[in-house]
Image (cartoon, coloured by chain):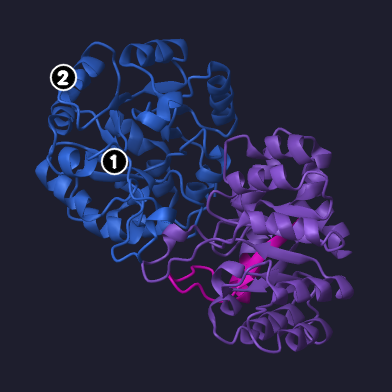
Chain colours: A purple, B blue
Amino acid sequence: MIVDMNAFLGRWPFWKLRYQGVKNLLKLMDRAKIDKAVVSSLDSVFFINYEEGNMDVADACRLHPDRLIPFAVINPNFPLWMDHLEVCVEEYGARGIKLHPDYHKYSLLSEEAAELMRKAKKMKLPVFIQTSIMDMRHHPGYCLVVEASILEVASVIKRYSENTFIIGGAKHFGSRVLELLGQVSGCKNFYIETSGIGGPFDCIERLVESIGSSKLLLGTRMPLLYPESAKLMVEKAEIDEEDKEKILGGNASNLLSI
Amino acid sequence: MLVKSMIIDIHAHPSRDRKALRSMLEAARKAGIDKVCLLPIRGRSFERYFYTNEEMKNLVKEYSDWVIGFSAGSCIDPNGAEDLEKAVRDYGLKGVKIHEERNWVLKGLLGCHGLLRKAGELGVPVIIHSWHEEEGLPPGSEKYVGLQGRFPVHIISEVARKCPDTILIFAHMGGNWEKALQAAKPHENVYFDTCGFDPIIGVVERAVEVLGPERILFGSDAPGRSFVAQLSKIQYADISERDRRLILGENAMRILGLR
């Protein structure tokens, strides 16, 4: 089974998405032969009331429970976020939390973030930290968004050893991952989502050699990016078939019990 | 969706580490790329990718089936044009790469350095590094987007106008692709390569809509980028098979004079 850990529903404000909406997302999944996708809301990143995006993702996932798995975007800067998290889990079926500290402008080391980690641990929810969605240079000048600090991500992984983290990024994420790995050696409570690993040409081989395939989760960031890109990078990598199977879906299946 | 035809990577860099270079070329072959244009780079931070013209000639001889050699040009060096002539006539190199240098934009590009005109005379393309610019960036942003790398897109049209006989290939889809494509539209001598940015759905499609497929060239920006991921931008773009073949290799063959 192939599982994409990082797909989106919703709008991208800076250009029109060619594959927008749930029907088009499923079309991309079918084309790329992806069985299931973890989906979070882009609208929740950009709307002031981020809760609305989570509602839309929940509606889409209810219609396609065999294909789509919701993660709830939570903004700990927004009042009553904890109540909304409970709604996302109990009513919307969210299987994890998605954080965008760069757009929502909070520190992962803040007191609110600490409370979120404690809550996530209690609810047994993995926390996906997206350090950036898209290279900041692909933003218009009025909207320069500085990516979240990978050193804060490292601190969080070390501080909350009983939480499970998934780390994703965009611009130069490969370099950020190397920086992260230098800080968190010995930690077992994190995964790296692969959509931001765009190079070097043998990056998947190097990552598997460095941290093993059990720590990697296929992600595509569709419909922003072609899903075939991330998938083919794993399928064509010079690694064992067992490693490919883990990255493409085995690790995600274990993590999410699917 | 996948098209079997000659695939030429117009934009990759030769590592001075020969073992790493070999690995890169083997990876390109495995990804289905028939030939790789090796673009050496001049500049302080890029020694690991610099080859002299003679060294490039020897590299091409060693890997004759795999690689096409370019010269590392400088548009602020007074000998730039002369060096290019020698690179093409004596060493058989097929084009020239210009990368960031101090004052390169104002002094070199906008001044239409002799190297640019010489390339036109010799019939070889100039690949120009072009990366992001957005006018009106907030104060402090240069820390993140880099001052040296800023490349205002109006340069595209100004240089194209001053050097109408030269094929100018702006790398990385001109940086801010929406503006770059519009700037390039009236200038038939301006092309873009697709290398280096994420495989964003819609960029190649947009380039074909604005410019037509004949002015777009596949590139990878290896070794820093994955061949597979960069190829996927063209292989999975919503364009015709004919357009795909043009972008993947036929345009490069035409521009480089290959049969």
Disc 1 is placed on an element classified as strand
Q: Nearer the viewer, residue A88 or A67?
A: A88
Kind of residue indicated by mark 1 = Ile
Of marks 2 and 1, which one's residue comes earlier in the chain? 2
- Residue occupying image coordinates x 26% and y 34%: B126
Kind of residue indicated by mark 2 = Glu
> Left of B59 or right of it: where is A206?
right
Residue B201: mark: none
Q: Give neighbour class at mark 1: few <14, some 14-19, many 20+ (Cα, 10 Å).
A: many
Q: Nearer the viewer, residue B163 or B66?
A: B163
Screen quadrant of the C terminus of chain B: top left
Disc 2 is placed on an element classified as helix
- Chain hosting mark 1: B
Q: Is A20 covered by the magenta stretch?
A: yes
> Left of B116 or right of it: where is A98?
right
**Residue A159 position by quadrant:** bottom right
Same chain for the residues under marks 2 and 1 in the image: yes
User: Vertically, is A27 above or below B72?
Assistant: below
Residue range (magenta): A1-27
Q: Nearer the viewer, residue A33 or B166?
A: B166
- Chain hosting mark 2: B
Residue B169: mark: 1
Q: Is B240 covered by the magenta stretch?
A: no
- Residue occupying image coordinates x 48% and y 19%: B16
Label 2 belongs to which residue?
Answer: B82
- Residue occupying image coordinates x 16% and y 19%: B82
Q: In the rendered image, is residue B37 in sight? A: no
- Where's residue A71, x and y in %? 73, 73
